[in-house]
Amino acid sequence: MKLDQHHIDSFNSDSHKDHDRAFLHLADKVPDIQYVLQQLQEFQVAIPSWALGTGGTRFGRFSGGGEPRNLEEKIGDVGLLHALNRSSGSISLHIPWDIPENAPAIKALAAQHDLRFDAVNSNTFQDQPGQAHSYKFGSLHHTDKAVRKQAIEHNIEVVKYGIELGSDVLSLWLSDGSNFPGQLNFRQAFQRTLESLQEIYAALPDDWKLYIEYKCSEPNFYSTTIADWGQSLMLANKLGSKALTLVDLGHHLPNANIEQIVALLLMEGKLAGFHFNDSKYGDDDLTVGSINPYQLFLIFNELVEGMDARGMRHATDLGWMIDASHNVKDPLEDLLQSVEAIMIAYAQALLVDAKALEAARQSNDVVTAQEILQEAYRTDVRPLVAQARLLSGAAIQPVKLYRSLKVRDQLIRERGAKTVATGL
Ligand code: LRH
Ligand code: MN
Ligand code: MN
């Protein structure tokens, strides 16, 4: 199914009056409103192809129906999201969950929805049917050279698919690690990982990037071979300028100061970008901003300040991706909420009076520094984000329109009530 612009326009004209009042009230207080609106309109967040079905837990999976049955239908779903918010203009593929067999046709279909291909992700954390060697004891860090070779070749194959689709990033996450003390020689495992990554890096085109994602635990619960930002950064530094550290918000030990990590990686020119999600306990993959929106704002505050200091373009100079999926929500509604939460945190960060904050820091005026941050955070910027959407031809209230058009019912009619999308 495809959304007609007239659906969006007529929905918007119904909600126009209330929105205009709220927006004008806010616009009065924002010094550089045109700049903020323009930044918001440019900002795009990639949608993961693996989050378009209802997510599972290891205890069960409850399909909501109408889930995309193939890559074409996944592109259709992301097209719907992008039509609703004009902020989801790309899709990130996980291979082999999604294999673009006929890349030119897939690329053309994406273009029809105004979508491009973001980072391509490799998967060496599961065994695939017919695979020669098992990843039970890891992939790039494996003690057996044949397993490492298989994992290296898979990554190179993923890059080939990415080239055909017009992507320019390989995003790599390893589940490699150990479950029990004594199982692994940490130093050797790290060294083998580096050597494997060097082979992948050598196969990367010059204009490509390699994003190295870290994660403190799961599925290994004693050690992870790339466990934290320091270990990812060590690898990225040894590999070269194309290798960068990817921050997935759910991959830290509890209470980690992620905004500080982000600030320093950015300072070093080694921040790849993000997998956005939220969490309370571990890698919960909950809707962005649903648990700790203040942390998300603080991260964006570091990003805006740090990117401005380095002359970087917010929309294009880092990788912005969602990595969240849930087992009780309609995945499309969940993703609309996630994108909205990101836009809100970004808009709030754009409102921070950076000069006054720096002055407060210089004079050690702690109270004023806190007031400045919280002034921005406590501003209800939703009308600002909605105005940016309106200017881009998107819906003022995407979830409301999605519901009023009964999109899920239509998808169930088209695809069936029992379809299951590939992914987590
Ligand atoms: C690992 C992870 C990584 C994978 C995705 C499916 O927890 O965050 O990004 O590729 O989940
Ligand atoms: Mn991730
Ligand atoms: Mn994760």
Image (cartoon, helix red, strand yellow):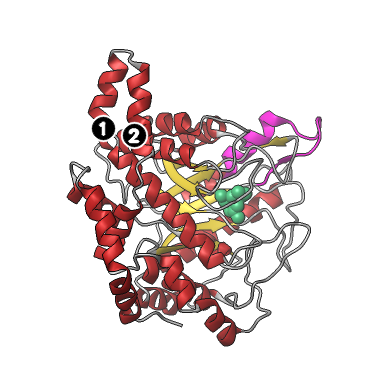
Q: Please, what secondary structure does the residue beneath circle 2 have? A: helix
Residue 181 covered by magenta stretch: yes
- Asked whether, in this view, residue 140 is left or right of residue 312, the answer is right
- Is 376 part of what is drawn in magenta? no
CA gap, disc 2 and disc 1: 9 Å
Find numbered disc 1 in the image and state the secondary structure of the residue it sits on.
loop
Image quarter of residue 416: bottom right
| Residue 392: x %, y % from top left | 27, 65
Judging depth in this view, the residue of 263 and 390 nearest the camera is 390
The reply to whether discs 2 and 1 touch (Cβ–Cβ < 8 Å) is yes
Q: Amino acid at mark 1?
A: Asp
Residue at 27 percent of width and 59 percent of height: 387
Q: Which residues are magenta?
A: 175-196
Lateral position of residue 129 relative to residue 72, left or right:
right
Mark 2 near ligand 2 (CB under 8 Å)?
no
Relative to 281, is 166 above or below? Answer: below
Q: Is residue 66 above or below residue 354?
A: below
Compared to residue 356, the image places residue 343 above or below, namely below
Who's the residue at 38% across and 51% down the image? 343
Look at the image and tell me in which quarter the C terminus lies: bottom right
How many neighbours does mark 1 have within 10 angstroms: few (below 14), some (14-19), or many (20 or more)?
some
Three-letter code for the amino acid on which mark 2 is drawn: Glu
Numbered tag placed on residue 375 in the rendering: 2
Residue 195 or residue 173, whichever sits in front: 173
Q: Is residue 31 left or right of residue 116?
A: left
Residue 353 is marked as: 1
Snapshot quadrant of residue 273: top left
Q: Where does the image place residue 418, in percent across and percent down from the top left?
A: 68, 79
Res 157 visible:
yes
The residue sitting at 60% across, 65% down in the picture is 96
Which residue occupies 25% across, 20% down? 359
Q: Position of residue 318 (x, y in %)?
A: 37, 46
